[in-house]
Image (cartoon, rainbow, N blue to C red):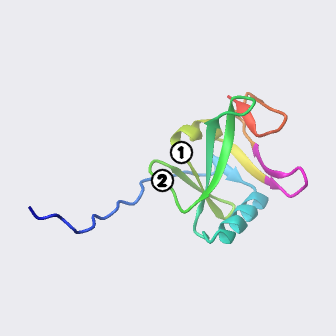
Amino acid sequence: MIANTQAQPVAAPTFRTGDERLIKLTANAGSKVGALLTKQGRPGGVLRVAVVGGGCSGLQYKMDLQDGPANRDFLVETAGVRVVVDPKSALYVTGSELDYIDALDGGFKVTNPNAATSCSCGESFSA
């Protein structure tokens, strides 16, 4: 029996292109994300925005810098950066705007029209 030693080509992830109706970054947020990607050595990278269970209101945002989109992601180009959202999270973030406030109590702030309630810390919500 002869083993196949040739490397199999790895398929590129299949993703869908979305637009700013899914998620939009302000100019401040785009600048900050771009600077963070560059600092990490990922100038062509993406910001992943996800919604996960947890937080004091039941759901919370999770943001992560990654090399590129994964299978089934939605890819949105906004404010000069690329943002990816998985299909499940897209149900919760559609129409949201991500801003960055450079202040002592600042950071990334999400304005989400789908949030029925949000907590005082601004990091979790219910839908």
* Residue 121 horizontal side relative to residue 51, left or right: right
Q: Which residue: 52% across, 60% down?
A: 68
Examine the rendered structure and indicate whether residue 68 appears above or below residue 56. Answer: below
Q: Residue furthest front?
A: 1
Asked where in the image residue 32 lies, by quadrant, the reply is: bottom right
Q: Quadrant of the N terminus?
A: bottom left
Between residues 20 and 82, which one lies in front from this camera angle? 82
Q: Which residue is mark 1?
A: 86
Tell me, for residue 64, which label it has, or none.
none
86 or 53: nearer the viewer: 53
Query: Mark 2 Cα within 10 Å, few/some/many (few <14, many 20+)?
Result: some
Q: Tell me which label, 1 or 2, sits earlier in the chain.
A: 2
Q: Nearer the viewer, residue 1 or 123?
A: 1
| Furthest-left residue in this view | 1
Q: Which residues are magenta?
A: 100-110
User: Residue 110 in the image: x percent, y percent?
Assistant: 75, 44
Element type at marker 2? loop
Please state the horizontal and vertical placement of residue 45, each as a whole percent of the image: 58, 64
Across and down, in percent, residue 9 comes to: 30, 65
C-alpha span from label 1 to label 2: 8 Å
Is 127 contained in the magenta span? no
Judged left or right of residue 76, residue 96 is right
> Which of the numbered marks, if any, corresponds to residue 70?
2
Q: Dots 1 and 2: beta carbons under 8 Å? A: yes
Report the residue at 58% width, 40% height from top.
Answer: 89
Say what secondary structure mark 1 lies in: loop
Q: Is the residue 86 above or below the residue 65 in the image?
A: above
